[in-house]
Image (cartoon, rainbow, N blue to C red):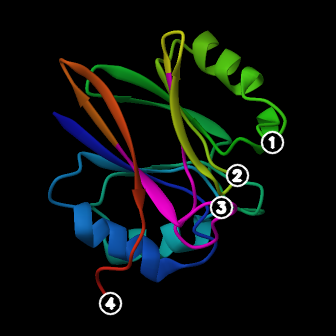
Amino acid sequence: MTRIVVVSDTHGAFDVLLDLVKRYQKEAACFIHCGDGAEELEELHRLMPDVPIYAVRGNCDYTAALPASRIVEAGGHRIFVTHGHLFGVGASEEPIQRAAREAGADIVLYGHLHRGTTHYDDGLYVMNPGSPVRPRDSKASFGLLDLSDAGVVCHLVPYERKYR
């Protein structure tokens, strides 16, 4: 099984990102950050340069040298990662799902809304991990993505600080 930790919208809360990395670094194949966390990602890279983390630029990552979207190959799956603001996710998931399908992905991960959600739509697993620091209309959360020969399982996990 391949486990991926998915987080988004940490907005400068380095302690939260570090907490999640410490909590899952032994079991996670990698970490994916769906944007609005460039500053803490830079700090994490300085402190722990060997942590495998894939990130994209969010609408608040003004000067970040990160891509707006990217493909991550893991556990036999093709994952489309973006922040979501450039696809209008506040109005509809249709454009982001279309982009993921055109990229040949079977999983799409995005942030921006600060609301955790996960569902399956005609061959595409969709997850927004929410925000562990600034949730909107939900509890603080992050995501776990478990990939195996049996399939894909998307978990939304309530965030409670474990490490200090």
In the image, residue 80 above or below residue 149: below
Q: Is residue 127 visible?
A: no
Query: Is 92 colored magenta in this rendering?
Result: no
Badge number at residue 161: none
Decide which of tag 2 and tag 4 comes sooner along the chain. 2
Find numbered disc 3 in the image and state the secondary structure of the residue it sits on. loop
Q: Which residue is mark 3?
A: 36
* Within-10-Å neighbours for mark 3: few <14, some 14–19, many 20+: many
- Mark 1 in CB contact with mark 2 (< 8 angstroms): yes
Q: Which residue is mark 2?
A: 112
Measured as percent of width and height from the top left, residue 39 is found at 59, 72
Q: Residue at x 57, y 68 (%)?
A: 10
Q: Earlier in the sequence, mark 1 or mark 2?
A: 1
Of labels 3 and 4, earlier in sequence is 3
Residue 38's image quarter?
A: bottom right
Tell me how far mark 3 sits from mark 2, CA to CA.
8 Å
Task: Please report the bounds of the magenta region as a residue range.
Answer: 125-144
Residue identified by numbered label 4: 164
Q: Position of residue 73 (x, y in %)?
A: 37, 27
Q: Position of residue 9 (x, y in %)?
A: 61, 62
Q: CA distance from mark 1 to mark 3?
A: 16 Å
